[in-house]
Amino acid sequence: MRLAGHAARTGEPILRPPAYHHAGYEDVTDQFLLGEDLLAAPVLQQGAITRGVVLPPGRWTAPGGTTFDGPGNCELPVTLETVPWFRRAR
């Protein structure tokens, strides 16, 4: 709801490409940010067992509690039903 209110006030989109906040990430087109603090990297290939994720600068926490430091890349085990996502650690 906070993001929707912010979007209504500013016109800023809720879903944002990584390059919206991080210069140099213009080629990352299969991931998106929800606001500045949630990063999602959907599984797009049928039968995929891993998903490479490009992490922008900062510390990112996966739902299981594993923390990753960006900028960098990580490879995660996935299924087609999995949606890898991360919350920016503060």
Image (cartoon, grey):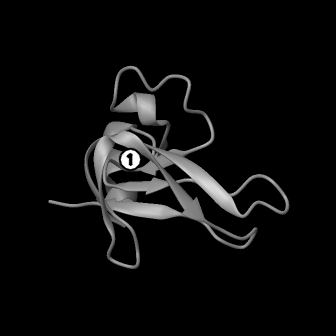
- Quarter holding the N terminus is bottom left
The image shows residue 50 at horizontal and vertical percentages of 65, 59
In the rendered image, the quadrant that contains the C terminus is bottom left
Q: In this view, does 75 lie to the left or right of 7?
A: right
Please give the count of numbered marks on the rendered protein. 1
31 to 75, vertically: above or below: above
On screen, residue 35 above or below 13 = below
Can the viewer see residue 33?
yes
Q: What kind of residue is marked 1?
A: Ala
| Pick the front one: 85 or 47 | 47
Compared to 15, does 71 lie above or below? above
Q: Is mark 1 on a helix, strand or loop?
A: helix
Determine which quarter of the picture holds residue 10.
top left
Front residue of this view, candidates 23 and 53 = 53
Side of 34 where 30 appears, left or right = right
Name the residue at the bottom extreme. Answer: 64
Residue neighbourhood size for the residue with mark 1, other residues' Cα within 10 Å, grouped as few (<14), some (14–19), many (≥20):
some
Q: Residue at x 72, y 71 (%)?
A: 79
Q: Name the residue under label 1.
A: 7
Q: Left or right? Give the position of 66 relative to 77.
A: left
Residue drawn where x is 44% and y is 36% of the image = 18
Which residue reaches farthest left?
90
Residue drawn at x 69%, y 57% is 43
Question: Residue 15 location, x and y as percent?
Answer: 50, 47
The residue sitting at 40% across, 37% down in the picture is: 11
x%, y% of residue 30? 63, 41
Which one is nearer the viewer's eye here, 29 or 62? 62
**In the image, farthest residue toward the right:** 46
The answer, for residue 42, to whether it is visible in the render is no
